[in-house]
Image (spheres, grey):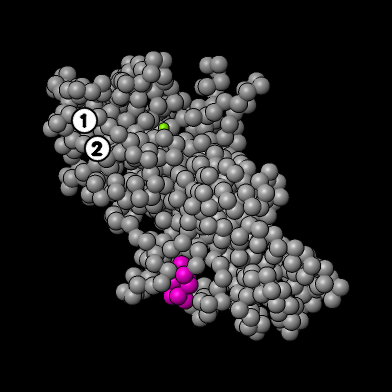
């Protein structure tokens, strides 16, 4: 499949955008008119630069408000079109995007539209240019791709075809199945975009919230499957208007964009296979090594220059030290199957932070090869002979992700590289597992992170939530596996104003699940654990919301435990104090409770905010 991207997706100058697209490996680009108009490069220079970079210039866009107008305006529109056709000749671009009229159309009759598009096609023919006519979702009389295609067929001119844009089709919930019936010769261009499901007018959704495929909620696999069945062989190009992408680092966004097209091809191929297709289609959707979902967390790693505070918290929670690694500056702490590595190789003065996560996968080498084909940067990790070699990749927030060999009983072979364990290494706590990990995402990398974990790690994004906090709404995105063996929560933390500057609320945590949370909390309290202190008002509210037995409510209050209940079961949890940017959580899931205590999250945010501010 030929890959493309519109320059409007990216930040920077046209020059910078072109360099980033070439570096990310795109075959071609769409030149967005404003990028050319504001560029210091002449059209000839743009053409030469593209050739030097190995990029083809696939589309010039947009040309607006042509069709369905009165005669006087039509003459002006044709003059305007001819000027652009001449410009395209200088750029060496043979296809122009013409959007269905939004602003100036007064004639809705199909025969008028056909007649006017025929005049445009004739003019285009004289200049050797192809017109790709696109039905905008908010077009005045033409807002449906099938309508646009009918008009194009009625004109029946070799220089007129359609542009299919997944945004305009899926934001209106148009059925994508009829795409298969379209004449592939008449599909001149295909644009793809994803978007979240927001209740908002389509124009605002389009201009600000489009995202790369895999970062929103459109069914693009089905769109691609139907498209492949038409026999279309042209470019599939990203056209994303997104406020954040246009402020972010251009090179990174281009890589994120390319990753989305690699993922999209696989999604299309998988959809076709599920439909029983064996035939290779002309569109040739490239596939990746398929990997099953990870089965669990293998370990979580906290990196810090001074280990004492983390060691103390883990010990008080019931973890036992398994000693130091025989060749590296790392310690292993365990509680049942929950493994935490304390990495001491942090720069002087750096505070504790979650630096790495290990995931149990069926085949680490295959999973790593898949991730690399999805442009995930490789993380090298030194290891000696006879030590386990970890396959590592870097997540967008630079957390290191290690793909580890999963075992049926949940053990990890590499733990033998540690020791000797002080006091026998037996944890004084119960059996525990890592229940979930909550990572704070920088605002400019949030969507990128969703696609990264979806594509490279086969986690499934759940509908996101917004949690109130003293510094604004915290966007919270759960990514998990179907059996919930892995639960990862991505939080978009708001920035805090502090004096003249901005301060990032960068708190992340690792949550462990135990069978008896009250017993765990009691033992931890005895060992002197500093709990996050929950206000008395919370327990009054809890008593009002749930009819709890007074003794139980008293235990929750005494131990700073939080509680939630829904139709599936109950949830008990508590938080530790924060060290550096890390804190820990202990949870008990009763019945089939599947959530994270969402009603309690605002309490946690408010108390942590309070603690931070009284410390300043
Ligand atoms: Mg478009
Ligand atoms: Mg981190």
- Circle 1 is placed at which residue position? 383
Dividing the picture into quarters, in which one does residue 393 lie? top left
Which range of residues does the magenta coloring cover?
224-233
The correct choice, above or below, for 192 with respect to 128 in the image is: above
Q: Quadrant of the N terminus?
A: bottom left
Where does residue 419 sit, x and y in percent of width and height? Answer: 15, 23
- Asked if marks 1 and 2 touch (Cβ < 8 Å), the reply is yes
At label 2, counting other C-alpha atoms closer than 10 Å, the crowd grade (few under 14, some 14-19, many 20 or more) is many
- Circle 2 is placed at which residue position? 390
Q: Is residue 256 left or right of residue 82?
A: left
Kind of element beneath mark 1: loop
State which tag comes first along the sequence, 1 or 2.
Answer: 1
In front here: 377 or 558?
A: 377
Q: Dominant secondary structure of the magenta stretch?
A: helix
Disc 2 beta carbon < 8 A from ligand 2?
no
The residue that appears at 13% across and 32% down in the rendered structure is 386
Q: Residue 373: tell me if it is visible.
A: yes
Q: Residue 548: tell me if it is visible.
A: no
Where does residue 426 sit, x and y in percent of width and height? Answer: 17, 26
The residue that appears at 17% across and 19% down in the rendered structure is 422
In front here: 18 or 430?
A: 18
Q: Which mark is residue 285?
A: none
Where does residue 175 sit, x and y in percent of width and height? Answer: 54, 73
In front here: 216 or 336?
A: 216
The correct choice, above or below, for 350 with respect to 572 in the image is: above
The residue that appears at 23% across and 26% down in the rendered structure is 332
The correct choice, above or below, for 308 with respect to 257 in the image is: above
The residue that appears at 58% across and 31% down in the rendered structure is 495
Tell me which image quadrant ligand 2 sits in.
top left
């Amino acid at each position: 499949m030929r890959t493309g991207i519109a320059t409007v997706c990216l930040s920077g100058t046209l020059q910078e955008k072109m360099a980033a697209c070439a570096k990310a490996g795109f075959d071609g680009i769409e030149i967005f008119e404003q990028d050319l108009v504001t560029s210091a490069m002449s059209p000839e220079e743009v053409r030469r630069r593209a050739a030097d970079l190995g990029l083809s210039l696939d589309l010039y866009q947009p040309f607006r408000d042509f069709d369905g107008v009165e005669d006087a305006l039509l003459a002006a529109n044709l003059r305007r079109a001819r000027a652009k056709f001449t410009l395209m000749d200088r750029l060496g671009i043979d296809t122009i995007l013409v959007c269905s009229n939004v602003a100036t159309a007064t004639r809705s009759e199909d025969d008028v539209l056909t007649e006017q598009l025929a005049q445009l096609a004739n003019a285009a023919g004289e200049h050797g240019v192809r017109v790709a006519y696109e039905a905008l979702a908010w077009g005045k009389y033409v807002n449906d791709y099938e309508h646009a295609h009918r008009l194009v067929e009625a004109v029946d001119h070799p220089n007129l075809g359609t542009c299919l844009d997944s945004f305009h089709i899926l934001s209106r919930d148009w059925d994508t199945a009829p795409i298969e019936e379209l004449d592939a010769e008449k599909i001149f261009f295909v644009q793809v975009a994803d978007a979240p499901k927001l209740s908002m007018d389509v124009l605002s959704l389009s201009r600000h919230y489009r995202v790369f495929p895999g970062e929103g909620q459109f069914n693009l696999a089905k769109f691609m499957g139907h498209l492949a069945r038409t026999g279309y062989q042209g470019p599939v190009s990203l056209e994303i208007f997104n406020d954040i992408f246009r402020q972010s680092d251009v090179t990174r966004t281009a890589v994120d964009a390319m990753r989305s097209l690699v993922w999209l091809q696989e999604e299309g191929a998988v959809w076709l296979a599920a439909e029983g297709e064996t035939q290779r289609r002309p569109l040739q959707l490239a596939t990746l090594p398929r990997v099953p979902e990870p089965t669990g967390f293998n370990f979580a790693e906290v990196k810090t220059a001074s280990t004492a505070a983390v060691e103390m918290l883990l010990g008080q929670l019931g973890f036992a030290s398994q000693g130091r690694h025989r060749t590296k500056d790392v310690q292993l702490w365990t509680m049942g199957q929950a493994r935490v590595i304390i990495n001491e190789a942090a720069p002087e003065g750096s505070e504790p932070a979650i630096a790495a996560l290990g995931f149990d996968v069926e085949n680490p080498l295959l999973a790593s090869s898949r991730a690399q084909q999805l442009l995930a940067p490789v993380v090298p990790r030194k290891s000696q002979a006879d030590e386990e070699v970890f396959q590592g990749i870097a997540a967008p927030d630079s957390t290191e992700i290690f793909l580890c060999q999963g075992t049926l009983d949940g053990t990890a072979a590499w733990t033998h590289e540690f020791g000797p364990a002080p006091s026998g290494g037996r944890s004084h706590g119960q059996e525990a597992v890592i229940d979930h990990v909550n990572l704070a995402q920088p605002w400019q990398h949030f969507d990128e992170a969703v696609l990264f974990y979806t594509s490279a790690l086969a986690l499934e994004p759940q509908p996101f939530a917004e949690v109130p906090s003293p510094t604004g709404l915290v966007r919270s995105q759960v990514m998990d596996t179907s059996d919930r063996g892995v639960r990862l929560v991505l939080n978009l933390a708001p920035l805090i104003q502090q004096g003249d500057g901005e301060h990032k609320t960068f708190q992340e945590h690792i949550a462990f699940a135990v069978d008896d949370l009250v017993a765990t909390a009691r033992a931890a309290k005895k060992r002197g654990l500093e709990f996050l202190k929950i206000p008395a008002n919370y327990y009054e509210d809890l008593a009002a919301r749930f009819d709890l037995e007074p003794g139980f409510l008293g235990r929750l209050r005494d131990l700073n435990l939080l509680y939630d209940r829904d139709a599936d079961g109950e949830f008990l949890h508590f938080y530790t104090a924060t060290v550096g940017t890390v804190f820990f959580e202990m949870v008990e899931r009763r019945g089939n409770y599947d959530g994270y205590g969402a009603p309690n999250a605002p309490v946690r945010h408010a108390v942590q905010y309070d603690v931070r501010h009284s410390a300043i």
